[in-house]
Amino acid sequence: MITFLTSAWRAGLRSRSIQGILILGAVLVGVAYLSASFSPRQPRTVALDVGLSGLRITLILFALFWVQELVGREIERRTVLFSLTYPVARGNYVLGRYFGVVGLLALAAMLMGLLLWLAVLTTGGEYEQSFVVAAGAPYWITVFGLWVDAAVVAAFALWLSTFSTVPMLPLALGLAFAAGGKSLGAVAEYLAKGADGDPELMRFAPFINAIQWILPDLSRLDWRAWPMYGLAPEALAVVLGLVLAASYVAVLLSLAVITFSRRDFQ
């Protein structure tokens, strides 16, 4: 597995992905910095909110891109057969590629998180806003949550890549998975509170409740209220969110290993 992990790292670092990280990081900093001008009273809070949203989207795109590049494209071009000549189980290839992608995502999260951190600290000048942005541990813990979010999406895309015969299917469904997982919690909470008395919307409540058994609630991994407003999440909620993400990743990786091991590449 280590062999496939290191080869994934080398392939990822040799590609233009690092250049993309730097470019997107610069764009992220610029957008976050400029967004602060729309709120003269809370410039750093607005910059941080916009920046974290951009960071999540960027990490998810990188996760899908790297899975497609390091797994999907190898399967499509049949170059994966060279990797399968090693006297190791096929599951080692799947796990090695996944942890390689997760490592690349960690590097991207640290680089773009650092650029966003610098952008937030330089906005607003000497203006003292009522809510002081917590740019220390709360900020980096929030970035960690976004990295875990992207790792879950990467596991889902990897599973799709092990059986998909359509190159763009993991990318398209991966984006839908990320969007659905992020909004699922808010929609379920809204319906649980009665949907403002709208009976038409309440008809979807059983459907949403059923989806909650299939899709993970990725909104549990978004803790931006902590660095933005000092509202620390409950420790139990954080632990449950991480356990949910880890469990979902474990299930998806198990499915990916089983599917890939049974796939016929002839």
Image (cartoon, rainbow, N blue to C red):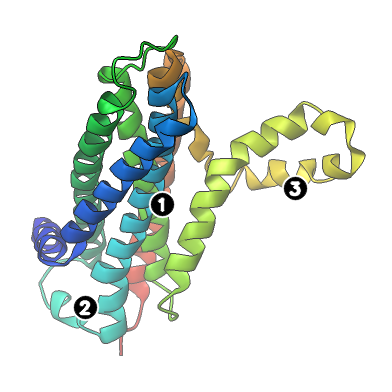
Residues under labels 3 and 2: Cα distance?
39 Å
Q: Quadrant of the C terminus?
A: bottom left
Instruction: Write down the quadrant of residue 122 in the picture.
Output: top left
If you read the primary sequence from the N terminus, does the residue marked by circle 3 or circle 2 appear first? 2
Which structural element holds mark 3? helix
Determine which residue is flagged by label 2.
80
Q: Quadrant of the N terminus?
A: bottom left
Q: Which mark is residue 207?
A: 3
Judge from the rendering whether residue 21 lies leftward or rightward of residue 35; answer left or right.
left
> Picture coordinates of residue 109 (x, y %)?
25, 42
Which structural element holds mark 2? helix
Residues under labels 1 and 3: Cα distance?
22 Å
Judge from the rendering whether residue 23 lies leftward or rightward of residue 193; answer left or right.
left
Kind of residue at badge 1: Val
Q: Which mark is residue 105?
A: none
> Picture coordinates of residue 150 (x, y %)?
36, 47
| Residue at x 18%, y 45% (from the top left corner) | 107
Determine which residue is flagged by label 1.
153
If you read the primary sequence from the N terminus, does the residue marked by circle 1 or circle 2 appear first? 2
| Residue at x 17%, y 57% (from the top left corner) | 18
